[in-house]
Image (spheres, rainbow, N blue to C red):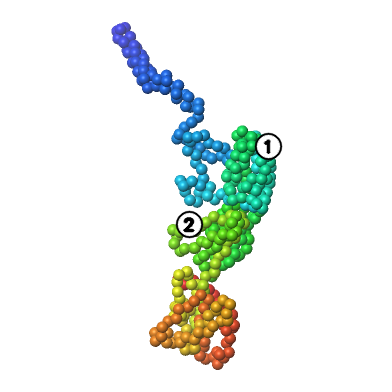
Amino acid sequence: MRSSLLNKMLIPGIALWAMALIFVASAVGQVSPYDSASHSSSQSSGSSNSATLPVIPGQTQPEGQNVAQPGTSGQPAGSVSSMVSSIGVGDLLRVGVLGAPEFDQESRVDGDGNLPVAMIGPTHVAGLTTQEASQVIRKKLMDGGFFADPQVTLFVKEYITQGVSVLGEVKNPGIYPLLGPRRLFDVISMAGGTSEKAGETINITHRTSPDKVQSVTMSRDTSEFAQNNVQIQPGDTVMVSKAGVIYVVGDVKKPSGVVMESGTNISVLQAIAMAEGPNTTANLKSAKIIRRTKGQQPQEIPIDLKKIMSAKVQDVQLQPEDIVFVPSSTSKTVGVRTLDSIVRVATGVAVYRAP
């Protein structure tokens, strides 16, 4: 009985020792002393080909590492880095070096796009992002031997133009505050949205390139909204164009103006139909088109609306800013109505978009 009790106590202990020896043997067989040495060496060097580190302004990354940088092809459109505003003439910048508070300084970008920086002199930064400008300053400080590995910090403390101008066919044109980059739809929303006469073309003049105009065509296709929602920076000017409008006035049920969408045509019959047709007292034979040409006097084009409506003569295609005037047969003073009075009436009617 005593021997059986000893066996019960020794067998589990022997099994545990055997498992421990097997584990140690397997570990020794997988990692040799040379492998361990090389492994510890690689850890001490700090290199890893699969590591991905964030970009820190003014800091270089070790070779062999995949650095996630903004503006690369692998970055999706509309990311945060794509919204970074560029530096412009007159902007107030604050430049510093970590660990060197005596280097901190504030300067404005001069008319040539240069920023006066202590030790290195004027540095061209206009058109660059703050990250790109900090890298340029860092390189100059290292090339001049002023710092071995400076960590440069740079940010725009004040934009020379703190607003964006929204003009043209918007409900509330004016200058709106814009302290950082925004998108086109946000800026138009600040101005109350587009007006009833707004066209499909929006021209944008960027403060960094005033000689170049960026045109954006607003499409009804929702899949193109993201593409049209371009970046707007402080100091930019947004001009919403005016669409062509056809006016129908006189003895019709609903005197109004109809917006001509881009690439569409409107005939006399279509314009009359959008005005809900003529009244029973209308003089259809004496209708006319008043066409205003830039730099010239308005031109009268007589049309026989009765024959057009009965398909006896061909319908007439209208041009933007044309006025279709339908006189009343009961009035004896139709001929007295001058072109100026008709134009004044036309410009005062409500404008809407055709469905």
Q: Quick one: which residue is furthest to the right in this view?
A: 102
Looking at marks 1 and 2 on the same chain, the residue that comes earlier in the sequence is marked by: 1
Q: Is residue 332 above or below residue 187?
A: below
Q: Position of residue 283 (x, y in %)?
A: 49, 89
Question: Looking at the picture, how far across and down is residue 45, in whole percent?
Answer: 50, 27
Residue 260 or residue 189, whichever sits in front: 260
Number of numbered tags placed on the structure image: 2
Say which amino acid is labelled 2.
Gln
Disc 1 residue crowd, few under 14, some 14–19, many 20+, Cα 10 Å:
few
Where the N terminus falls, by quadrant?
top left
Q: Is residue 318 visible?
A: yes
- The tag on residue 101 is 1
Q: Which residue is mark 2?
A: 227
Image x and y of residue 216, in percent: 51, 61
Q: What residue lies at 62% left-to-right and 47% top-to-bottom?
A: 124
Q: Secondary structure at mark 2?
A: helix
Asked where in the image residue 21 lies, by quadrant, the reply is top left
Residue at the location (46% across, 87% down)?
Answer: 304
Report the front residue among 187 and 303.
303
Residue that protrudes farthest toward the front in the picture: 144
* Whether label 1 touches label 2, CB < 8 Å: no
Q: Position of residue 79 (x, y in %)?
A: 50, 49
Q: State the SS at label 1.
A: strand
Q: Residue at x 65, y 42 (%)?
A: 95
Give amino acid for label 1. Pro
The local crowd at label 2, few if under 14, some if 14 to 19, many if 20 or more residues have their Cα within 10 Å, is few
- Furthest toward the bottom, the residue is 332
Quadrant where the C terminus is found in the figure: bottom left
Front-most of 320 and 309?
Answer: 320
Q: Is residue 273 left or right of residue 151?
A: left
Residues at marks 1 and 2, CA–CA distance in whole angstroms: 44 Å
